[in-house]
Amino acid sequence: MNDGSAVDAGNPYSAGSDRLEVQGITVHFGGLLALDDVSLTAGSRQVTGIIGPNGAGKTTLLNVLCGFVRPAAGVVSFGGQELRRIRPHHLAKMGIARTLQGIGLFSGLSVIENVMIGATSLAKAGFWSGLLGLPRSDADEQRLRDHSQQALELVGIGDYADAMPDTLAHGQRKRVALARALAARPRLLLLDEPASGLAESELAELGDLITSLAQQCTVVVIEHRMDLMMSVCEQIFVLDFGKVIASGTPEQVQANPAVTAAYLGTDVTQAPSEFGSLASTDANEAAPGSGRGASW
Ligand SMILES: Nc1ncnc2c1ncn2[C@@H]1O[C@H](COP(=O)(O)OP(=O)(O)OP(=O)(O)O)[C@@H](O)[C@H]1O
Ligand SMILES: [Mg+2]
C-alpha cells in the first residue's frame, strides 16, 4: 500500500464530513499500469495537491474519481460514504465537480450558457428542456441564470456573460470552466491544471481564489506550477509512474530528494537538493508528451 497518511486523524482540519479517501486504486490501460495501488486522503475543506511528472497518472486518478475510468481495484469514499460505481452523470448530485486539463467549453454556447450547464443539477426544469424545445419553467431558468452569473462574478468575469468563449483570452476561458464547476455548488472540487497557460501575473489571483474556495468545499488540485502549489496546498501527494512516492506539506515535499529525482529523471543520489529552483517553469513549455526530465 502506498503512503496515504499525509493527512492524519489528529489533524483537526481533516476531520469532518467532506473528506475524500482513496484506497488502493489500480488502473491498467492494456499493458500499462497507469495507477498502482494509490492511496491518499484529501482533508475536508482543505486544498490537497497532486503533482508528478508528465504521464505520472494524475489525470487518470481524477478520471477514476469522476467515473470516467473504472479502476481494476480500490475504493473511493467521500464524506464517509463509499462511492461505488461512480457515473459521470451522477457527479453533480454527489456534490462532485471538476475542471478538465484542457478547457472544454462549448464554442457554440455563450459564456453564461456554458456555466448554466454546470448548474443544471440545481434546476427542476429549464435549461436542458429549453435547449430541447420542451416546455420549461421561465422562473427556474432565470434562477439558473442568476446563479451562473454569481459563479462568473466569483471568478472575476461577470462582465463576459454574453460573450462567446472563442472571443476570450485563454485565462478568461479557464475562469469560465472554473465557474461552470462552481455552479454545481460542489462539496468536492477537482481541478486539473487550473494554471496551465496562465501568465505569472495571474497566478496570485488564482491562488487566492482556490484558497477561498476551500472555505466551502474540499479541493483537489493537480498542477505543475509549484509556486502556486506551495502557496495554496495544505498537503501534497506526489505521483510517479502511477505510484505515490511522497506526501506531506509543500515544504516536506519540496525537500524530498525522491521528488526532485522523479522530475529530473535521475537517480536520487544525483539529484540536486534545491527543488525550488525548478518551480517556476511552466510544464506547458515542455515539448508535448515529454515526460521524464521535462521541466515543471
Ligand atoms: N485512456 C487511456 N488509454 C490508454 N492510456 C492512457 C489513457 N489515459 C491515460 N493513459 C496513459 O496513462 C498514463 C498516465 O496518464 P495521465 O494522463 O494520467 O498522466 P498525467 O500525470 O495527468 O500527465 P500530464 O502531466 O502530462 O497531464 C500515461 O502513460 C498515459 O499515456
Ligand atoms: Mg494530466
Image: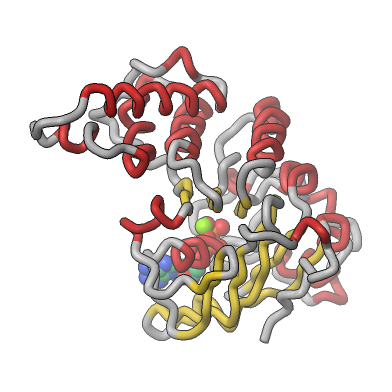
Does 101 sit above or below residue 260? Answer: above
Return the residue found at the far top.
Answer: 159
Which residue appears at 68% of the width and 56% of the height? 44
Residue 118 in percent (x, y) is at: 38, 40
Residue nearest the observer in this picture, 175 or 42: 42
The picture places residue 246, in percent across and down from the top left corner, at 76, 71
When the figure is inspected, residue 76 is found, relative to residue 93, above or below; the finding is below
Q: Is residue 54 left or right of residue 276?
A: left
Q: How many marks?
A: 0
Is 65 on the left or on the right of 107, as rendered? right
Q: Nearer the viewer, residue 223 or 267?
A: 223
**16 or 36, which lies in front?**
16
Q: Quadrant of the N terminus?
A: bottom right
Q: Is residue 230 left or right of residue 205?
A: right
Q: Is residue 129 visible?
A: yes
Which residue lies at the image location 79% right of the left edge and 70% below the top edge?
A: 9
Q: Position of residue 167 (x, y in %)?
A: 37, 19
Q: Quadrant of residue 291?
A: bottom right
- Residue at image x 51%, y 74%? 82
Q: Quadrant of residue 143?
A: top left
Locate residue 240, reporting x and y percent: 64, 71
Q: Is residue 82 above or below residue 90?
A: below
Give the image quarter of residue 136: top left
Query: What kind of colouring is applied to the model shown?
Result: secondary structure
Q: Is residue 296 visible?
A: no
Rendered position, 269 above or below 101 = below
